[in-house]
Amino acid sequence: MTPKQKKYKLFEVTGIELEYMVVDRDTLKVLPIVDKLFEDVTGAITSDVERGDVEWSNELVSHVVELKTAKPTKKIPTFRKKFSGEVKAINAVLAKRNAMLLPGAAHPFMDPFTETVIWPHDYNEVYALYNRIFDCRGHGWSNLQSTHLNLPFANDEEFAKLHAAIRLLLPIIPALSASSPILDGKVTGFLDSRMEAYLHHQERLPELMGSLIPEAVFSQEDYYRTIFSPIAQAMAPFDTDHVMDHHFANSRGAIARFDRGAIEIRVIDIQECPSADLAIAELIVAVLKALTSGRWVSSYLQRAWDENDLLPLFLQVIKDAGQAMIANKDYLLMFGLMKQDQMTAQKLWQHLFVELYGELSEGCRQQIAHILEHGTLARRIVERVGKHPSHEALLGVYKELAVCLEQDKQFV
């Protein structure tokens, strides 16, 4: 979805990005060597490695690598083997440096204040600007890995439907995807610690994130006036060299990319293996399709939700994931639940899974069933390491997660 390409229609294609940490195989200490990885493969330090259907690219910090669909795909399940194959390829190269990829949305014992290395190569002027404004040595900047889901729209009408549906779904996505229960070697009390840290990482310039849940705007003109204009004004005193693109500065949980004709969802924690990530992506797309088609309620009713009504639900869910109790009858009604006064987020996802079962691939069904039966990856991690984990326990479990990533299998 580049500016030169045609604009795709609603749900015609999907773009997916997966972020992973590079760590020492023995100690799991983060290693800022993504530039060396790229150099080992291409012979030069670069910010992108083209590998056919999947590309590798750098991120803000030098220990994180992103795998992404080179072009938007019409069929999400076809990328399971492709992403998994690239994970194996990267691990084979990293092995020469006694390094490997580690999954999960936050490193369990990285110290971001001493271990952060900002990417020093291409696009560094933008990263340096962020570092000057915010100091990127916090968990909300340098210790977070996510799955980004890009969904297209062809015009304002499609944008309005898609934005309304995404805003409504954002609060419960971490009930499926939370995978970051541990920071600084301690269980934080948030199953999605990545999003809790992210909520606070730009408090110096609150215009960049707003309420995390995007404002109720449903046209490009309104989006520029309500969201992009305040962002530009907030950044202007700092961005004196004009290096920042307003699309890039927008840090909401879902951001409109009018340059691409897409909305990017950013609240999904990365899982233990590509199959799980793509299953979550597939289910999210299926729910959004149902919402935009008016399966349960009209798009008009979906647009009535204020971000300040949706944010409290999100805050509950990043803490308790599937066990978060949703006691908002009006919210449950948006998904066709007319008789329930309250329901856990996990039960709501079970309802959606059953409703849309016939529209999901077999692989997706298996992966989602595992999450709904055993809980989010975050809950499974805490159950294994305990509420007060030792360093040895964390090493053991996260090495097991690295094996899950290498073998593309779910963590039990």
Image (spheres, rainbow, N blue to C red):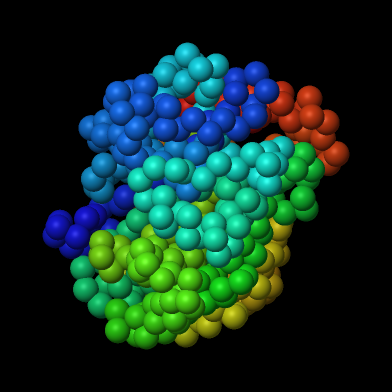
x, y percent for residue 208: 50, 72
Where on the picture, by quarter, is residue 372? Answer: top right
Name the one closer to the observer, 188 or 313. Answer: 188
Name the one closer to the observer, 67 or 364. Answer: 67
Seen as rendered, the residue at the extreme right is 388
Task: Please name the residue shown 32% across and 36% down the image.
Answer: 46
Name the one closer to the observer, 205 or 51. Answer: 205
User: From this viewpoint, is residue 123 visible?
Assistant: yes
| Left or right side of 312 for 128 | left
x, y percent for residue 373: 63, 41
Task: Please name the residue shown 60% across and 57% down the image.
Answer: 135
Where on the picture, by quarter, is residue 275? Answer: top left
Name the one closer to the observer, 403 or 260. Answer: 260
| Left or right side of 188 for 310 | left
x, y percent for residue 228: 39, 77
Task: Please name the residue shown 34% across and 40% down the image.
Answer: 47
Where on the picture, by quarter, is residue 232? Answer: bottom left
Seen as rendered, the residue at the extreme front is 241
Task: Please name the residue shown 48% across and 65% down the image.
Answer: 251
**Where is the N terminus found, in terms of image quarters?**
bottom left
| Left or right side of 116 for 114 | right
Total marks shown come to 0
User: From this viewpoint, is residue 82 visible?
Assistant: no
